[in-house]
Amino acid sequence: MKNRKKEHIDLAFDARIELLNADKRFYYEPLLSAHPTKSLPEFEFAGKKMRLPIWVSSMTGGTKKAGDINRNLARASKEFGMGMALGSCRVLLEDDSHFEDFNLRPILGDDVPFYANLGIAQLEELLEQKATDKINNLIEKLDADGIIIHINPLQEAFQPEGDIFKKSPLDTLKEFLQIFNGRVIVKEVGQGMGPESLKELLSLPLEAIEFGALGGTNFTLLELMRHNSNVSEYEKFASIGHSAYEMTKIINDLVENGLDNKCKQLIISGGITDILDGYFLQQNSKIPAVIGMGSALLKVSMNEYEELETFLKQTEKSYKLAKAFLKPKKL
């Protein structure tokens, strides 16, 4: 106890928060709860059960390093009761040489929501070829719960080897949904979506919309960085988009104004660097939502599993404390 009191004295002058740095998003209510000690309760999401409302946003695959990262994330998803999405599974449409990098169901177990992932360009091509049975085969082979379709026109436009869309992504999605009976999630890849796109998606029978909002990993910028030539004329395109805050507000406004919403859930991702960012938007959402994390998890999943486990233990504790003592203000 003496050491603790001495540390209090030594640190007192440094342990100050300037009012300008205060987090104004929450009411802090210290009287209304005991410290949370119980496990988080299970809830249904995307066809299975979750406990910690964190969604492992689509990462990567097709290399040994990517396979190791995916296996760490799968192990963590099982331990903490999270949901998980794969990175693009396009390579698996060609052959099974990288299958083990994506074969995570044996690690995840049966209860964790787990989704395969393809780009809208691949979906357009498969529809044109009348080969969408390949998607069913992919889902069955991976024992996945459904498919994520990522929408990425700017990424493809600036990717040196990018695909060209012949149709609007909306037309492609509508055509696919007419013939596909499984669960479908639609996401962007780092720039989010505006009100007209969100309104159209909400009217479709989707399992979820994932934001992929501006503020996280931006795949348009990533592709521009891959160019060897000067692409300065294009650089401002990477700064265009919508934040997770803005997208949550847009969707809330659409729902409150009587939109006939057919989408079941949201995955709030893009620029979510800590649990309070996600918790604030999740609690404000008018549609059931979980918190998507990509680069924050990627960073700690590259090394030993214990580093990822420690990060998620801290994340889980933070979420429990937020639920107990923080009341989010309205957007």
Image: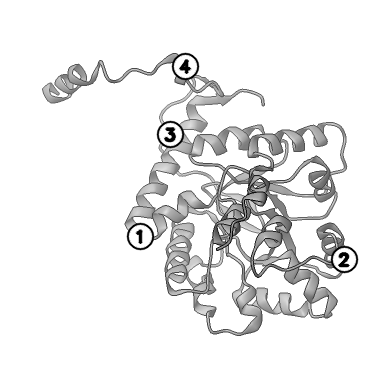
| Mark carried by residue 175 | 2
| Mark carried by residue 36 | 3
- CA–CA distance in space, label 1 to label 4: 37 Å
Per the image, label 1 sits on a secondary structure element best described as helix
Question: In the rendered image of this protein, does residue 260 appear above or below residue 55?
Answer: above
Per the image, label 3 sits on a secondary structure element best described as loop
Query: Residue 87, position in %: x, y?
Result: 58, 64
Q: Looking at the image, tell me whether mark 1 or mark 3 is earlier in sequence order.
A: 3
Q: Nearer the viewer, mark 4 or mark 3?
A: 4
- The reply to whether discs 2 and 1 touch (Cβ–Cβ < 8 Å) is no
Q: Amino acid at mark 1?
A: Tyr
Residue drawn at point x = 54 percent, y = 72 percent: 102
- CA–CA distance in space, label 4 to label 3: 30 Å
Rendered image quadrant of residue 179: bottom right
- The reply to whether discs 1 and 4 touch (Cβ–Cβ < 8 Å) is no
Q: Dot 1, how many residues are within 10 Å of its Cα: few (below 14), some (14-19), or many (20+)?
A: some
Residue drawn at point x = 63 percent, y = 48 percent: 235
Picture colour scheme: one colour
Residue drawn at point x = 84 percent, y = 76 percent: 128
On screen, residue 309 versus residue 28, left or right, reads left
| Mark carried by residue 40 | none
Q: Looking at the image, tell me whether mark 2 or mark 4 is earlier in sequence order.
A: 4
Q: Amino acid at mark 3?
A: Pro
* In front of the other: 119 or 41: 119
Q: Dot 4, how many residues are within 10 Å of its Cα: few (below 14), some (14-19), or many (20+)?
A: few
- CA–CA distance in space, label 1 to label 3: 26 Å
Residue 229 can be seen, yes or no: yes
Label 1 belongs to which residue? Answer: 305
Q: Dot 3, how many residues are within 10 Å of its Cα: few (below 14), some (14-19), or many (20+)?
A: some
Residue 211 can be seen, yes or no: no
